[in-house]
Image (cartoon, rainbow, N blue to C red):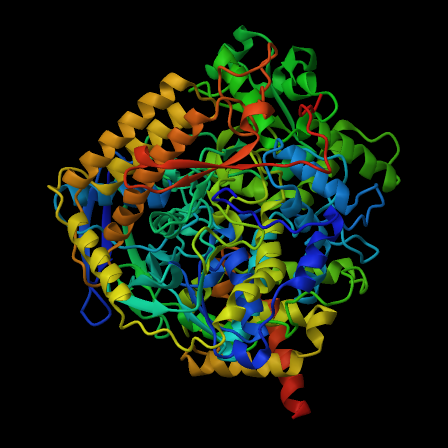
Amino acid sequence: MNLHLKIWRQQNANSKGKMVDYPISGVESDMSFLEMLDVLNESLINKGEEPIAFDHDCREGICGTCSLMINGEPHGPDRLITACQLHMRKFKDGDTIVIEPFRAKAFPVIKDLIIDRTAFDRIQQAGGYISVNTSGNTVDANAIPIEKHKADEAMDAATCIGCGACVAACKNASAMLFTSAKVSQFSLLPQGRVEATERVQNMVRQMDLEGFGNCTNTGACEVECPKGISLENIARMNREYLMATSKG
Amino acid sequence: MAVLDSKIPTGPLAEKWTKHKNEIDLVNPANKRNIDIIIVGTGLAGGSAAATLAELGYNVKTFCYQDSPRRAHSIAAQGGINASKNYQGDGDSDYRLFYDTIKGGDYRSREANVYRLAEVSGNIIDQCVAQGVPFAREYGGLLDNRSFGGVLVSRTFYAKGQTGQQLLLGAYGAMNRQIQRGKIKSHTRHEMLDLVLIDGKARGIIARDLISGEIERHSAHAVVLATGGYGNVFYLSTMAMGCNVTAAWRAHRRGAFFANPCFTQIHPTCIPVSGDHQSKLTLMSESLRNDGRIWVPKRKEDTQAIREGKLKPTELKEEDRDYFLERRYPAFGNLVPRDVASRAAKERCDAGFGVNKTGEAVYLDFSSAIARYGNEKALTSGIKNPDKDTVTKLGKEIIAAKYGNLFQMYEKIVDENPYNTPMMIYPAVHYTMGGLWVDYNLQTTIPGCYSAGEANFSDHGANRLGASALMQGLADGYFVLPYTIGDYLSDDIQTGPISTDSPEFEEVEKGIKERIDRLMSGSGKHSVDYYHKKLGKIMWNKCGMSRNAEDLKSAIDEIAALRKDFWENVKVTGGKQGMNTELEKAGRVSDFLELGELFAKDALQRNESCGGHFREEYQTPEGEALRDDENFKYVAAWEYKGEPKDAVLHKEELVYENIKVKTRSYK
């Protein structure tokens, strides 16, 4: 099939970017979206032009590296997948496809479609862990039974891949879904309860410092999340935060 | 004494590790604060080592090419992690895990290393649970297990089909805690390009900041390489696009021996190649072989009809199907080790029974499991005489709960619903058992340069069992390296900070800058990918699932010629400054082009078949691998001498004192 691509090009963080048109032909329906970009890049290289820089790594939907806004939707039109799992069979001959980086003040562009998401790492560093030493002197793994449904719920929250689609989808560029997923995972487990008060306060503080917006319950994040992280996590984080702050 | 000293402690097998830990030198906490350690790679092995070393008090600097340690490719491991907890009471023990791993590796790994791995395996699970890793649980609240290939017990712990993700996020959390305390300085989007030796000891690295393009010097008292495997030498593999051999290879060029490069794991259950544009292959977890049955049609005419779309696989009668693994290996059936399953699938496809258009696919069928689970669920739900639709519906629900994310992944890629029609699968490159040679302390042949996880060669012999990679990565990082490295660093407590303003750093940096200039000055005929794909084709066709002397010899010549062509004619667009993804790829491919040749050379010298290394000349009349213990019971460790063709082979004889070496049989 033949497609009209409109792609964001920006040399580096300090330069101004713009949309550039790239017609492409010979796209096959069983190509992945990123393989389609590979084909475009190969043709640009052969013409002596610089290829389009885009972030990608595992290409199986788990590393969370790819971060494309495709026709105004993070990871494109399909649901519960990342851009690397999107296949061209979702498009048809003659389509125009607009490809941009995830946009947020806290995610500055590094080059073309590549953004800086280290703000997410700093939120995790503020408290996204249980403070146990890793030298192995701990109790037997089966010493504390955990209700299956709680363990499963914790697992559902823990599947967040940190891609940033929630921020890109949100009109406030809020990182509440991302932050709440980690807060939820630990607040649901007995091991995580011990530090629950400090954790939620520290992580929320860092989230605000990074310049992410607040949540106004539009739910766009949940719709676009490739891992189906539920909005309930935000409710749970709000509850944890309220409990933590009222404790003083 | 040979060049290679494995430093295996004396004494009975089960006491070696404890004895060794008691005897090695320690560094006191105050002195640890004066010692710097560089860790390259922040996956399971590197991330866990960084966290533990920082917690012990060392100053740790980590480097990864990804934008965050959380994205290392350990994250993609699906199925699980082994541990000899014996929670199921099915007779598991450290010895049994040790035995299974040695046998699974076809008697080409070190007894002492593997026993230590089994010994610390239980601790890994305790540790991870304490960190909040949400492993799957039973209704009673205790941890659940499942089975993996090559074993007869249920010892695999898992978190849905995302075990690697959960374990990596655990290690990432532990790292984050130390980053927040200021004990780890994390350098993301940085790539190590060379190792710096001072007075014969590893004292630092040269790295490129992938955003600014700056070439940087970083010093330390020791350097740990935990940079994963080199499967991308095949271009198509289940590895992430960025996985590379560069750090390990540059260390090899500086004197670290590279061991058993030809030992590569081809995983049986991956989604088949769909076309020339393909950039990577996707694994379908081995855990699926708990419930999926592998088959092809018995008759060629049925195969033909299926390929032409005239016959659906679901329409083929039970007696017309060849469940070839169950037929050939009745004791282990669909749960034979990966190398055995892959070769059996290739054998059927080569014989003309492959079920997709290219003839390179077999079925992985869940219909029996759906019926079995459905009937069981109907009974426990009190439904008497359930009809077929009810059974199927209930059975599908159970399968969805177990493997839902894998089924979804398959459907998104292939556009077929695997609940209704069997999956099509074919073997693909997945893991590399070979890697940097290390002794019992995980030190390479360069003093002060250590290697952990998939990057080293140590524990899996010629074939790795499922759910053992996560175990090894975390064992190395959490429980082994942090102690063994102290023995070496105890001599460094007086050294003080290492300056980067030395002639040694100067020279290595200069060499790297020249190398980048050379990469950018090719005639510009072909892209980097062009060369990578060509290399991959040679590797897959001549060094893949089965190998022979003639092909290997021609592979060596072809790769050498391709490498020459690459350096003369590669086109690297953009500049040295700023981000340049083509330049990154070019550097990695230049190293693959050397490794590939050594790989073929290693496969050529190993005149036997063992594990993932199958030489057509050495097989039994039934087509099983024919090992030669008399002549090849050794680790092949290669010393760099310029071109790969000049590499010198050193042999570490493997000694089996606790296990009787016999022919591996899964029949």
B615 with respect to A235 (left or right)? left
Query: Is residue B526 positioned above or below B179 on the image?
Result: above
B441 with respect to B527 (left or right)? right
- The answer to whether any part of residue B149 appears in the image is no
Q: In which quarter of the image is the C terminus of chain B?
A: top right
Residue B3 image position (x, y, % from top left): 47, 44
The image shows a total of numbered marks equal to 0
Q: Which of B541 and A225 is in front in this view?
A: B541
Q: Which of A219 and B35 is in front in this view?
A: B35
Query: Is residue B147 positioned above or below A81 on the image?
Result: above
Query: Is residue B401 positioned above or below B274 on the image?
Result: below
Q: Among all residues in the image, which is located at the extreme bottom? A: A248
- The answer to whether any part of residue B292 appears in the image is yes
Residue B462 image position (x, y, % from top left): 55, 34
Residue A87 image position (x, y, % from top left): 40, 41
B244 with respect to B108 (left or right)? left
Residue B169 image position (x, y, % from top left): 56, 61
Q: Among all residues in the image, which is located at the extreme front? A: B1
Q: Quadrant of residue B191?
A: bottom left
Residue at 13 percent of width and 42 percent of height: B524
Residue at 76 percent of width and 40 percent of height: B96
